[in-house]
């Protein structure tokens, strides 16, 4: 069905057209230098806008297609259900168009809930233990990109934009103009892959660098779904972020019940829609993560910890991994959330926080008594006071440490 595009005849369309034109210029400037383009797609708003726009520009003949075009989807296994379903629908579209794509996941033992419940590493936090993003998203994607590169060169295309993150903006400003890039032509960098076994070279281009967040909403909600621009199923992505009402800093949706986020704005936006109201049990997940970080669910180093070089560790009595009992209890609680969601889903679509493979592996690791490196499970529980004897100045002193934690 042909969409009425008259709403794009306004001034907003002119701004949108200018943004698209700058993206075309960026791709025309750097795309021909590489025979292989790799799209790093997370399923979020920016990378989805980048992917769908890129495919349309190629199909419409506005940019020349590379010899090889690959899409890598970073599946963290923690995406909000509407985003995950949208990603599946987009991958179906890619398959129908004959576009090469691959789903990239972390190795089983390093997936978010397997790492927490199977190995016993506490949920991440912003102060001392922020391990999740690199492990379940960055490292698997970097390895997949390097693998696809082989001996040649590749242009990795990302959805990075200015305005999404203050830290990222400073990084962009510091590297502006690197490798011959010009302001206004996207963020272009040439880098060597981290893997020493890969002999090629990777360049990275962010062709939507200049897009404002309102342009992203406009593309996802109105342009991309239109037949003229590809007929992509992207409206639900805009809805998951709060749509047109979302502010830039509030539009950075992470994982379900992200332990690093204070508020679940994306989840609440989704639950406000009748179609997704059955996902309400997901509200309980954040409380489980908080509970797991409490001392009663964790072990603690006893006494003074001697390092390999004989020195004394800086954090005596530091809190560490989750007890086996806490892991089992948390697993059952999370499976119960999953069961309640599936029981209340009127459409019968099965939702899995933990799939069968992951549950089996978690139970295996617990049964084997698996612990993080440097821990053996014989340490006392973290809610039990342990005296530390310190010898200094000829006097024996007792003190209690453990105010900081690490694993």
Image: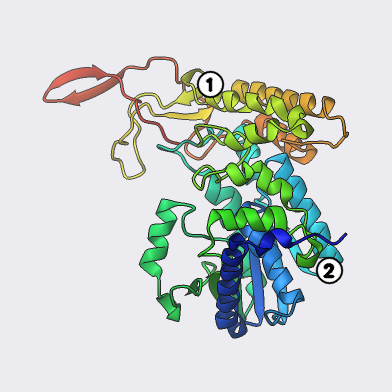
| Marks 1 and 2 close (CB-CB < 8 Å) | no
Q: Separation of disc 1 and disc 2 at Cα? A: 50 Å
The color scheme shown is rainbow
User: Residue 212 appears at what percent x and percent y?
Assistant: 53, 58
SS at mark 2? Answer: loop
Q: Residues within 10 Å of mark 1 (few under 14, many from 20)?
A: many
Residue at the spot of label 1: 297
Q: Position of 226 compared to 304: left or right?
A: right
Q: Quadrant of residue 116?
A: top right
Give the number of the mark in front: 1 or 2: 2
User: Residue 292 appears at what percent x and percent y?
Assistant: 55, 25
Residue at the spot of label 2: 97
Above or below 330: residue 162 = below
Q: Residue sitting at 63 percent across and 27 percent down?
A: 285
Along the viewing direction, whichever of 337 and 231 lies nearer the viewer: 231
Q: Is residue 84 visible?
A: yes
User: Residue 17 appears at what percent x and percent y?
Assistant: 61, 69
Q: Is residue 197 visible?
A: no
């Amino acid at each position: 069905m042909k969409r009425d595009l008259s709403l794009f005849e306004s001034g907003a369309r002119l701004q949108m057209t200018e943004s698209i034109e700058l993206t075309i210029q960026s791709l025309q400037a750097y795309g021909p230098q590489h025979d292989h383009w790799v799209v790093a797609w997370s399923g979020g708003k920016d990378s989805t806008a980048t992917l769908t726009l890129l495919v349309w520009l190629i199909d419409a003949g506005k940019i020349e297609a590379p010899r090889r075009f690959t899409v890598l989807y970073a599946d963290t296994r923690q995406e909000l259900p509407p985003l995950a379903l949208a990603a599946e629908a987009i991958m179906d579209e890619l398959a129908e168009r004959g576009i090469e794509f691959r789903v990239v996941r972390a190795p089983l033992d390093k997936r978010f809930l397997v790492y927490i419940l199977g190995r016993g590493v506490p949920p991440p936090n912003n102060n001392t233990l922020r391990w999740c993003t690199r492990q379940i998203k960055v490292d698997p994607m970097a390895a997949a990109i390097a693998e696809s590169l082989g001996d040649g060169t590749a242009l990795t295309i990302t959805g990075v934009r200015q305005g999404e993150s203050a830290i990222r903006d400073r990084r962009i400003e510091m590297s502006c103009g690197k490798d011959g890039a010009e302001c206004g032509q996207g963020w272009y960098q040439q880098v060597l892959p981290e893997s020493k076994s890969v002999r090629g070279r990777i360049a990275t281009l962010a062709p939507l660098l200049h897009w404002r967040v309102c342009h992203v909403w406009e593309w996802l909600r109105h342009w991309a779904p239109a037949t003229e621009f590809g007929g992509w199923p992207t409206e639900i992505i805009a809805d998951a972020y709060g749509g047109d009402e979302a502010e830039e800093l509030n539009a950075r949706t992470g994982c379900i019940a992200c332990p690093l986020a204070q508020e679940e704005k994306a989840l609440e936006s989704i639950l406000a829609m009748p179609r997704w109201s059955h996902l309400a049990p997901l509200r309980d997940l954040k409380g489980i993560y908080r509970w797991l970080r409490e001392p009663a669910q964790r072990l603690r180093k006893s006494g003074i910890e001697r390092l390999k070089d004989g020195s004394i560790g800086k954090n005596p009595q530091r809190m560490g991994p989750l007890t086996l009992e806490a892991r089992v209890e948390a697993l059952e609680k999370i499976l119960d959330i999953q069961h309640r969601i599936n029981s209340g889903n009127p459409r019968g679509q099965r939702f899995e926080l933990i799939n069968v493979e992951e549950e089996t592996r978690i139970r295996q690791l617990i049964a084997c008594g698996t612990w993080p490196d440097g821990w053996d499970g014989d340490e006392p529980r973290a809610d039990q006071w342990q005296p530390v004897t310190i010898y200094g100045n000829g006097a024996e002193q007792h003190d209690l440490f453990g105010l900081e934690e690490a694993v």
